[in-house]
Image (cartoon, helix red, strand yellow):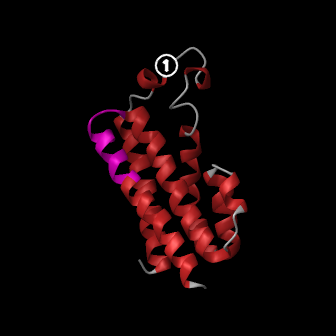
Amino acid sequence: MKRDNFEEAKRWIIQAEDEFKDADDLRKLGKFYLALFHFQQAAEKALKGYLFYKTSSTHIFYTHSIDELLNFAKRLDDEFKNYSMVKKLDRYYIPTRYPNGLPGSIPSRYFDDPEEALEASKLTENLINFIKNKLKL
């Protein structure tokens, strides 16, 4: 793989790590709706970094779905099947941000479960570490 692909992938992984740390800080502050969204974003960016490195394809940037990105990654590396639970993070892309994404509720008040946020944190952290290991970062 070309070195410039590695450098671009690394930028995405670094952003994913930074976003994960910020999300975990938000989780610890009890800002679960924001934490959940940023866990989703961190996982998305980590997957996009991996996929960009492996394929150099820009078509991956047209989706925000963890499920779709995982399916792309599984085609390249069967070990990604062990991370299929990460697709649960797709639930946090829209509903954590927009009241009309949660009819009859308000995201900042609806997402109030510390265990849900902890699970999202663990899923995201495990995925990022797996990808960093794959890319030898």
Q: Where on the picture, by quarter, is residue 23?
A: top left
Tell me the SS state at disc 1.
loop
Q: Which residues are magenta?
A: 19-31
Quarter of the image that includes the C terminus: bottom left
Quarter of the image that includes the N terminus: bottom right
- Specify whether 78 is left or right of 25: right
The secondary structure making up most of the magenta span is: helix
Residue 135: x %, y % from top left: 49, 78
What amino acid is at disc 1? Ile
| Count of numbered labels shown in the rendering | 1
**Front position in the image: 78 or 93:** 93
Find out whether residue 30 is within the magenta segment: yes
Mark 1 crowdedness (10 Å alpha carbons): few <14, some 14-19, many ≥20: some
Q: Residue at x 44, y 47 (%)?
A: 120
Taking 25 as reference, is 45 above or below it?
A: below
Q: Which residue is mark 1?
A: 106
